[in-house]
Image: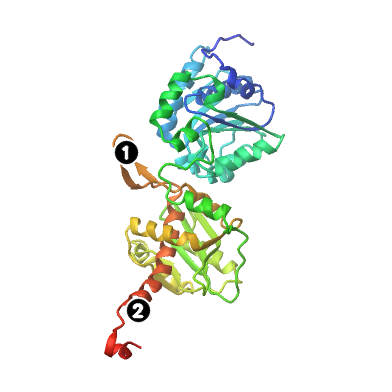
Amino acid sequence: MEIDVALDYQCRDAFRPLHQRKQRFGVAVAHRRAGKTVASIMDVVDAALRCKLPDPRFAYIAPYYAQAKDVAWGYLKRFVSPIPGVTVNESELRVDLPNGGRIRLYGADNYDRLRGIYLDGVVLDEFADMDPRAWSEVIRPALADRKGWALFIGTPKGRNAFWEVYERASNDPEWFALRLKASETGILDPDELEAMRGEMSEDEYAREMETSFEAAIEGSYYARLLTEAETGPPKRIGHVPHDPGLQVHAAWDLGIGDSTAIWLAQFSPGREIRLIDYIENSGVALSWYAQALRHRSQYDYAPLILPHDAQARELGTGKSRTEMLEELGFKVRIAPRLGPEDGIEAVRRLLPRTWIDETKCADGLRAIRDYREKVDPKRRVSMGPLHDWTSHSADALRYLMTAYAEPHAKREERRERRPTGANAWMGR
């Protein structure tokens, strides 16, 4: 038996195309306070009520679980409250509908917990702040057998994975694309926009209110340098071939229970740095990474570059990961011990002479482009690097650059210490 239920939702004109879309996949780029989360939650509720498949399953995913609760849980409960027979589970952030449908909130900070579920529809909110692998490795496969739909929503944060999804949607008629700028929607009062423009930086306003993907990301350590490398001249992000005459240096950041990242680079005689390949995975043994290196049989490896914590012994085996890699047949060396700030400065100093393969290093590029500092929102002061999905790639790059810089710095130091005058011959 079907019944008519009036839900507490008033659609804004700007979002009518979103609700009327026919495409399976879609992207909505919207300015702050446009109402994208409200519209997407209502979209999920409507889809869950109309779904004719048995036991429909829908999800809303935010970058963090706590964020999903703070941002969307109240809206979801409000919209389903008029539905007779609905059940709300506060502890699991889940609602069960009388037709057997279920809507649940998740955080992409622990996207592995979604492995094995199926979904008929999903909203990915603020996808720019998520590890892109949450979509490609877990969420997309969850939609496969029942041909579920997906909607990406958010506000730009540079030319990262969210930008890539929007670019694809804009050029593919099989995808839906919507872009809402504050200057065009009429949602916010013009006087309020003018006041915000006076209080925000030019980049902040362009990014947050005019949905610019080109505006600099607040606190980004490397975005400007990577943009320069991408645009040139010379253009230093593109196809970077492996040179068989040079050794390959593999710099690691070793995760325990999370990702391990490896940058593979060659150092040319002209002091160029060539990032030619990249490896990252999680939840696998050290032997998996050793095999991944061996699989690239064309590379002649220099001693692997490892962080200091690789020397710590594990309780289970009594061995350090340095020792384990040596037993697997690799020579290793430890990167110079520098604090994060000094390491970041080394990367900044060396990126202008670095060439990056945009295909083989695509995952690493996404990460270091998004790597940024954590800013205290009240005091507007830096709290050091933000630890998120980008950290492993960025740390591995720091170890690579500091290992590269150390021998050059020592040679410069030796030159400076050469004696002069009558005894200068002694320094030759």
Figure quadrant of the C terminus: bottom left
The alpha-carbon separation of the residues under discs 2 and 1 comes to 42 Å
In the rendered image, the residue lying farthest to the front is 421
Callout 2: SS: helix
Q: Amino acid at mark 2?
A: Arg
Residue 415: assigned label: 2
- Picture coordinates of residue 47, whole percent (x, y): 61, 23
Name the mark nearer the viewer: 2 or 1: 2
Q: Is residue 29 visible in this depiction of the protein?
A: yes
The quarter in which the N terminus is drawn is top right
* Disc 1 element: loop
Q: Position of residue 53 (x, y in %)?
A: 66, 26
Residue that appears at 34% across and 59% down: 342
Q: Nearer the viewer, residue 352 or 115?
A: 352
- Checking the image for residue 19, the label placed there is none
Which residue is label 1 attached to? 380
Who's the residue at 42% across and 60% down the image? 349
- Could you tell me residue 187's position as x and y percent? 51, 19
Among the 4 quarters of the image, the one containing residue 200: top left
